[in-house]
Image: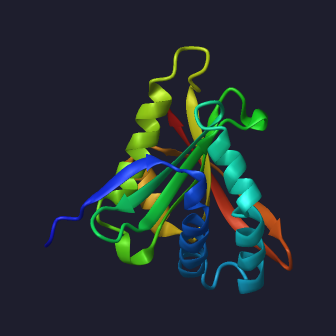
Amino acid sequence: MNKIDYVVRPARPEDVAAIKRVARETWAATYDGLIFPEVQDNFVNEGYSPEELNYSISREGIDFWFRVAETTGDRPEIVGFAEIYKRPALAPDAELARIYLLPSWQKKGIGNALFENLLQTIRALRPGLRPPRLRLSVATENKQAIRFYEQRGFRFEKDFEANLPGQKLALQNYVLEI
């Protein structure tokens, strides 16, 4: 197997279009049969709008931490991203809000590199700023993601349902002590 050369770095404003492209492709693959396509489109269009992404990127180190995985070489390409943020409703905890990789780049260690980079960044915050726990929500049927989280020490907290337009989605909350 060939060595994969990539870097994990903070997201920049010029990455916004590539992040949205990765989001659209990974959402289609991840949520096929779970979330209606038109609902996926709405989530991607709203949650990955230039305004939303630029807001997250502009708050780097304040209450958002957004990383991209980018291949190196002649034609660099963003193949994944991850984001942690401190949401007031979860205070003092933080949330792993999103971690997605293009399907062809999964199971190559890149998702782990993204996660570890963010986790090290959060753990390096001074006491008082460092959240004690990292939380996330995941679709109950997304078994691959659940395995990923459990292998990294997240523990199941509770089941719940989200009311999406025209459908319900079973979700689970997980928590990691930092």
The residue that appears at 66% across and 38% down in the rendered structure is 59
Instruction: Give the residue displayed 71% in from the left and 85% down from the top.
Output: 37
Image quarter (top left, top right, bottom left or bottom right) of the N terminus: bottom left
Q: How many marks?
A: 0
Give x and y (percent) for residue 6: 30, 58
Q: Residue 159, can we see it?
A: no
Name, please, the residue furthest toward the left.
Answer: 1
Residue at the far front in the pictured view: 74
Query: Where 80 falls versus 130 (above or below)?
Result: below
The residue that appears at 61% across and 53% down in the rendered structure is 13
Closer-to-camera residue (14/165): 14
Is 89 rendered above or below residue 41? above
Q: Nearer the viewer, residue 95 or 55?
A: 55
Which image quarter: residue 34?
A: bottom right
Is 64 on the left or on the right of 127, as rendered? right
Q: Coloured how? A: rainbow
> Could you say where residue 12 lies in the image, as x and y percent from the top left?
55, 51
Residue name at image x 57 percent, y 74 percent: 21
Q: Is residue 112 visible?
A: yes
Viewer-proximal residue among 84 and 51: 51
* Residue 132 in which image quadrant: top right
Residue reaching furthest to the right: 166
Residue 1 placement, left or right of 149: left
Instruction: State the image coordinates of residue 92 (x, y, percent, origin top left).
Output: 68, 26
Residue 101: x and y in percent read 45, 66
